Amino acid sequence: MVMQRIVEIADSIPSLVVVTLMMLVLKPGVGTIILALMITGRMDMSIIARTHTLRIKEHEYILAVRTQGAGKFYIIYIEILPNIFGLLLTQAMVNIPSAIFMGTFLSFVGLGLPMGSCSLGSLISSGFDNCLLHPYKLVPPVIILVLLMIACNLISDGLRDALDPTRKH
């Protein structure tokens, strides 16, 4: 309960603020971006895992396994984790577009990848700087960003439909 309250307090801080502060404090690069996105993205995953674990542990088959003498680790790793794995995988896929957008935004404002690295944010930023003279430089990276976001959302919807047995049509 204490850890969940800490997670809820940390989750109340906007992830953009946390990622921006980490990029200012640590050396900018791919590793720093990944670390910052892992820290901020973990909050939603832990809340979902806890909620579904508390719901599943009240089912009758968990009581039956516990009555047969199974230990806590067996119940968690053999009975509960396979039942929430699909939800966690779907949530991870839902977090990917926001991570892509966050990395693009950081590169756009100059806090992301170092200069000289090619990223969607730096391409959009250079196209934005020359928008009045050369508008065609802005269009391709924006289209790629939009298509990437749509593709990730479609994949996450497909995974949710495939892995969530309660949503069968």
Image: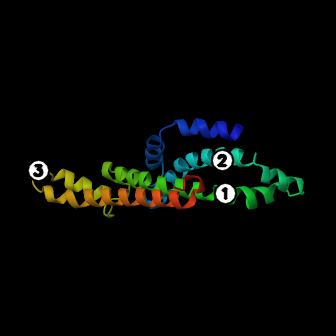
Residue 149, given in percent of the width and then of the height, sits at 37, 56
In the depicted structure, whether residue 28 falls above or below residue 2 = below
In the depicted structure, whether residue 127 falls above or below residue 12 = below
The residue positioned 59% from the left and 57% from the top of the image is 165
The residue positioned 53% from the left and 61% from the top of the image is 162
Residue 14, given in percent of the width and then of the height, sits at 47, 39
Residue at the spot of label 1:
83
**121 relative to 157 in the view: left or right:** left
Residue at the spot of label 3:
132
Residue at the spot of label 2:
52
The amino acid sitting under disc 1 is: Asn
> How far is disc 1 from disc 3 in space, using C-alphas?
53 Å
Viewer-side residue, 122 vs 115 = 122
Secondary structure found at label 2: helix
**25 relative to 84 in the view: left or right:** left
Using a 10 Å C-alpha cutoff, classify the residue at mark 1 as few (fewer than 14 neighbours), some (14 to 19) or many (20 or more): some
Using a 10 Å C-alpha cutoff, classify the residue at mark 2 as few (fewer than 14 neighbours), some (14 to 19) or many (20 or more): some
Using a 10 Å C-alpha cutoff, classify the residue at mark 3 as few (fewer than 14 neighbours), some (14 to 19) or many (20 or more): few
The residue positioned 25% from the left and 53% from the top of the image is 125
Q: Which quadrant of the structure image shows residue 118?
A: bottom left
> How far is disc 1 from disc 2 in space, using C-alphas?
9 Å
> How far is disc 2 from disc 3 in space, using C-alphas?
51 Å
**Residue 111 seen in the current view:** no
**64 relative to 152 in the view: left or right:** right
Secondary structure found at label 3: loop
In the depicted structure, whether residue 19 falls above or below residue 92 = above
